[in-house]
Amino acid sequence: MAKDHLKPLSFYIHIPYCIRRCGYCDFNTYTPSELKDGEASVAKVSQGYVDAAIIEINQAFDFLHGKEQVRPIETIFFGGGTPTLLPAPDLARILDELREKFGFAEDIEITTEANPDSVSAVDLKNLRVAGINRVSFGMQSAKTHVLATLDRTHNPARVSEVVNEAIEAGFEHVSLDLIYGVPGESIDDWKESVNAALALPIDHLSAYALIVEEGTKLGAQVRRGDVVMPPDDETADKYLLVDELATKAGMDWYEVSNWSLTGGEARHNIAYWHSNDWWGIGAGAHSHVQGVRWWNVKHPTTYISKLTSGESPMLENEVLTPEQLRFEEILLRIRLSSGLPLAFFTEAELGILNSYLAQGHLNEKAWQTGELKLTITGRLLADQIVRALNR
């Protein structure tokens, strides 16, 4: 396949370690007590994990180089887990291998997630020297009781400190994540959290409604009735509030849960929403390349063992049909402010969408110019609209 016909290439690096598991989290991550070697496990196995990740990078290169002219990488994202539990030199080793094998686009975006209490000012400087130019901190809330419900360990005051430390370290882009719809969180609590985030020198804000997942501590608490989730109307009001406050702060929404200053958009996530190609490195990481989706074995010990034995870490794969690819594009792109052309939809689908247009959930001006774009109420119903189209 000719290089100029290929989609941009991204890499996601999964670091599956946390010091403590948050009560709402069902991500593929492991605490020291969950790893067989006990308290020293994260430090003990991280070197072996990085070695395994580098082997997988070489497998990715061999696979892609056999099919195409190698593309330079446009974006890289270290997620988890808590990526910053690994020392900056370990993350730098991964970046060096990616650079050597694939090359980097001139304007590459390299992001790491971090908890406010998982990095020091020195750590941030080392991460910046390693080549990471964007950092996303899990703030979640400015209220101590909300953080306690979520089992977050940082002090709210640490958020301001760490954002300013990131700016001083030279990070080009700084983002904060918030969670709303938490049991016991009032509208005033939420407003205080959003305003606290927007008062800081950030260029990106994410706000996600809390989802109660089966198998989590929070899920068990809700099932027993120990905590009560807020009504949907209250959660919707909190979404409307964050949009109002972010807009007043000069940010634009570009995806249902994301706002940014001009140029501050998360390019890695945009690559996902545009169904570009990405390779996921690490235990449990998912990949999507040229219409094929696959995912790795979940446990880091198994992941390391397979790679050091010369095997692929892939657990399963799925070749997407044209119909699946088309629906996935609708599912993802409908969430973007850029929307979708109406020509993308069938007559039957346009009939369904017309009902949402009549209810004010789609932008009428955009519709008249042949585009589907959500209004703010449409954003609240994005998942419902997609389900209606998929019946």
Image (spheres, rainbow, N blue to C red):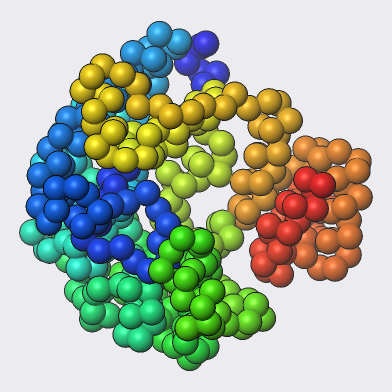
Residue located farthest toward the top when viewing the structure as drawn? 66
User: Does 72 sit above or below residue 390?
Assistant: above
From the viewer's side, name the closer residue of 326 and 42.
42
User: Does 331 sit above or below residue 98?
Assistant: below
User: Does 136 sit above or below residue 68?
Assistant: below
From the viewer's side, name the closer residue of 121 and 312.
312
Q: Residue at x 14, y 53 (%)?
A: 38
Q: Residue at x 78, y 45 (%)?
A: 390
Spot occupied by residue 204 in the image (x, y as percentages of width and height): 41, 62
Residue 10 shows in the view: no
Spot occupied by residue 150 in the image (x, y as percentages of width and height): 38, 74
Spot occupied by residue 222 in the image (x, y as percentages of width and height): 51, 76
- Numbered circles on residues, count: 0
Q: Residue at x 65, y 39 (%)?
A: 328
Residue 124 shows in the view: yes
Instruction: Judge from the rendering whether residue 108 lies leftward or rightward of residue 244; answer left or right.
Output: left
Instruction: Judge from the rendering whether residue 232 lies leftward or rightward of residue 341; answer left or right.
Output: left
Spot occupied by residue 158 in the image (x, y as percentages of width and height): 21, 76
Q: Residue at x 48, y 28 (%)?
A: 316
Q: Quadrant of residue 140?
A: bottom left
User: Does 355 sit above or below residue 328?
Assistant: below
